[in-house]
Image: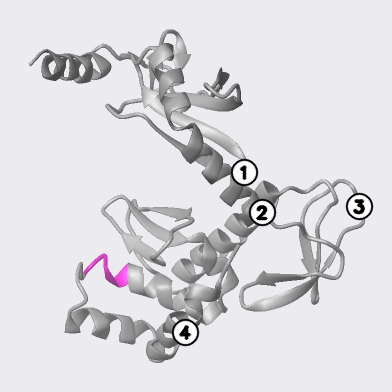
């Protein structure tokens, strides 16, 4: 009974005592914005040091994820730092496995390698130290100091530009919905009342396939399910959508960023 009461008290205290800043429109934790990442480290029982970044959020659960080789922990606003350190220590093995997988995913782009963009392959040139990632003809210029996060951001910008171009050229009225681009494991897109969501891997597929996914999600604004009327809506904007759909089924699992 005591353990249950403590859990209830913790959930209430972690949510009700948040203060609100009218200037920045964000919740504040001890004078800091909750969106700030705080660099910390902890020593495990086998004397390994794990560095991680902490962010406080309006949640009742604590979780971690690894991105670009950095361990990030999201914890409730009022959760003591000792309990957060204990959580990191307890999950040291799982964090280690995620770090290994993350390092395996990271690509090293070298001169002469191929770079995929919108279904085409570009030859990589790495010469200058600084500058932006640029494409010209069948080549792509990647600065020597560019990291995986810079390349992913380049992908993000290119895909968002293409999605917006499709929306504007076809006069799609998406209302106040935002365009959200993330890396998903099993879906190419989704539609909600607040946003149209797309998989970042779409930046690797041909332009016609991207258009099909955008049309597909736009039609979900009017038809939430995959009924006959939904597919008629898709066909009205793209008569050969079956061809693009088939391409995704046959090639989607092969795409890796």
Question: Residue 68's mark?
Answer: 1
Report the residue marked by disc 2: 106
Report the residue marked by disc 3: 128
Q: Residues within 10 Å of mark 1 (few under 14, many from 20)?
A: few
Q: Residues within 10 Å of mark 4 (few under 14, many from 20)?
A: few
The earlier-in-sequence mark between 4 and 3 is 3
Quadrant holding the N terminus: top left
Report the residue marked by disc 4: 250
Tell me where the magenta segment starts and ends, as one range. Answer: 218-222
Q: Quadrant of residue 109?
A: bottom right
The earlier-in-sequence mark between 1 and 4 is 1
The earlier-in-sequence mark between 1 and 2 is 1
Q: Please give the name of the residue rendered at 29% of the width and 72% of the height, measured from the top-left corner.
A: 219
Q: Secondary structure at mark 2?
A: loop
Q: Please give the name of the residue rendered at 36% of the width and 82% of the height, measured from the top-left corner.
A: 237
Q: CA distance from mark 2 to mark 3?
A: 21 Å
Residue 228: % across, % down: 18, 84
Q: CA distance from mark 1 to mark 2?
A: 8 Å
Q: CA distance from mark 4 to mark 3?
A: 38 Å
């Amino acid at each position: 009974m005591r353990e249950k009461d403590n859990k209830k008290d913790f959930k209430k205290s972690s949510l009700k005592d948040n203060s609100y800043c009218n200037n920045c429109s964000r919740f504040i934790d001890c004078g800091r914005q909750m969106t700030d990442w705080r660099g910390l480290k902890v020593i495990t029982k086998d004397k390994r040091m794990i560095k991680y970044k902490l962010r406080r959020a309006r949640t009742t659960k604590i979780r971690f994820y690894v991105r670009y080789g950095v361990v990030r922990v999201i914890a409730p606003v009022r959760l003591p730092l000792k309990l957060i350190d204990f959580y990191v220590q307890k999950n040291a093995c799982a964090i280690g496995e995620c770090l290994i997988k993350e390092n395996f995913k990271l690509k090293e782009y070298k001169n002469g390698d191929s770079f995929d963009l919108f279904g085409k392959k570009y030859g990589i040139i790495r010469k200058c130290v600084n500058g932006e990632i640029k494409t010209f003809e069948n080549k792509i210029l990647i600065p020597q100091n560019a990291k995986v996060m810079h390349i992913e951001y380049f992908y993000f910008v290119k895909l968002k530009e293409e999605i917006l171009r499709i929306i504007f050229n076809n006069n799609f009225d998406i209302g106040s919905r935002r365009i959200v681009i993330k890396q998903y494991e099993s879906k190419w897109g989704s539609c909600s009342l607040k946003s149209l969501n797309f998989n970042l891997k779409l930046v690797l597929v041909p332009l016609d396939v991207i258009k099909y996914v955008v049309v597909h999600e736009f039609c979900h604004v009017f038809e939430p399910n995959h009924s006959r009327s939904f597919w008629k809506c898709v066909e009205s904007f793209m008569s050969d959508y079956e061809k693009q759909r088939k391409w995704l089924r046959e090639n989607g699992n092969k795409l890796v960023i």
